Image: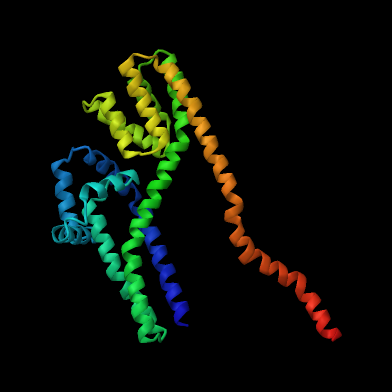
Amino acid sequence: MTLIAITALVLFGVVVALTLRALLLPRLQAADRIGQVEVYGYVSPTSSTVETTDDGRTLRGLAVRVGQALARRYPAHLDEDEIRRRLTAAGIYTLPPHAFAGARAMAAVVMPAVVAFCGSAFGAGFLVLVVGTGIGALLGWRLPDIALERRAKSRVAQIDRDMPELVDLLIVTIEAGVGFSGALQHASGRVTGPLGDELRLTTQENRMGLSTGECLSNMMARVDSPSMRSFVRSILQGEQLGVSIGQIMRNLAAEMRKRRRAVAEERAQKAPIKMLFPLVFLIFPSLFIVLLYPALVSIGEAL
């Protein structure tokens, strides 16, 4: 009965959270756009005032204060620049580094409390509660970091897969007589997903006064993937040596497609090994039960 009540409360909380997100989605999208601009150094007075006011009353503000306290207490273990780089690589522009560190600390406190409450509700022993709270604290501290790392890797992999299509689009635009900066701006309006976001940030930097080389170098620093490194380095070397950008793009597109095919073949070769464990521990036991149980029943009746 207790388990049913807990499940009902969890489902009710999920419904409330999804409803609130649906109602606040336009405001969240606007805040995300403002956060992307603030990453590049522009902060309006009204937005900073609103953020300071909201931080004093919201859970995010509490996380920011906890993160700032941790940064003052343990400055060697909380590198703000590294956390900001990882958040940017994951596509999270509106979350300050101190808020992420504070959220990890708060999760490390809340998770053991939840484990202790559930364990006491089900009548667990003292040793089980101690071990459970320790595991809960470790999971609360590590899970946000693991989730951020997985999101960043997934985003970088998606950008890596979309790079050949971007290069093809740039080839067509450049051969039509458009300059590289104009071709990049044109592609930023057509490419969607994480790669489109990075292109829009790059063109925004270019409009703010940075050179094309600096914008591409910043994009390579945000997205550390083999295809992005090859793309940026080829463009920079072509501009320095005076080589035709169109020919560089054609060679780059062929190289990226070969790399993508090699990655696909590598994943295909890993598939049988990954299928081995569910096959042995999940499929084979069920298959043996279905096939051998009638024979064992017949043998038992005969004996």
Q: Choose between 27 and 94: the one closer to the eye.
A: 94
Identity of the residue drawn at 59% across and 61% down: 277
163 above or below 22? above
The x, y position of residue 34, in whole percent, is: 25, 42
User: Can you tell which quarter of the image residue 207 is in?
Assistant: top left
The relative height of residue 138 versus residue 220 in the rendered view (above or below) is below
Coloration of the structure image: rainbow
Residue 68 x %, y %:
16, 57
Q: How many numbered markers are drawn?
A: 0
Query: What residue is drawn where x is 25% and y is 43%?
Result: 35
Residue 157: quadrant of the picture: top left
In the image: residue 275, left or right of residue 165: right
Q: Nearer the viewer, residue 45 or 252?
A: 252
| Residue 48, image x, y percentages | 15, 47
Most foreground residue, 73 or 18: 73
Q: Residue at the spot x=41%, y=64% of the render?
A: 14
Please indicate whether residue 169 sits to the left or right of residue 38 in the image.
right
* Residue 279 relative to residue 204: left or right: right
On the rendered image, what quadrant is the C terminus found in?
A: bottom right
Residue drawn at x 21%, y 25% is 209
As drawn, which residue projects farthest toward the right?
302
Residue 113, above or below 257 = below
Residue 66 lies, in percent from the top left, at 19, 62
Residue 189 found in image quarter? top left
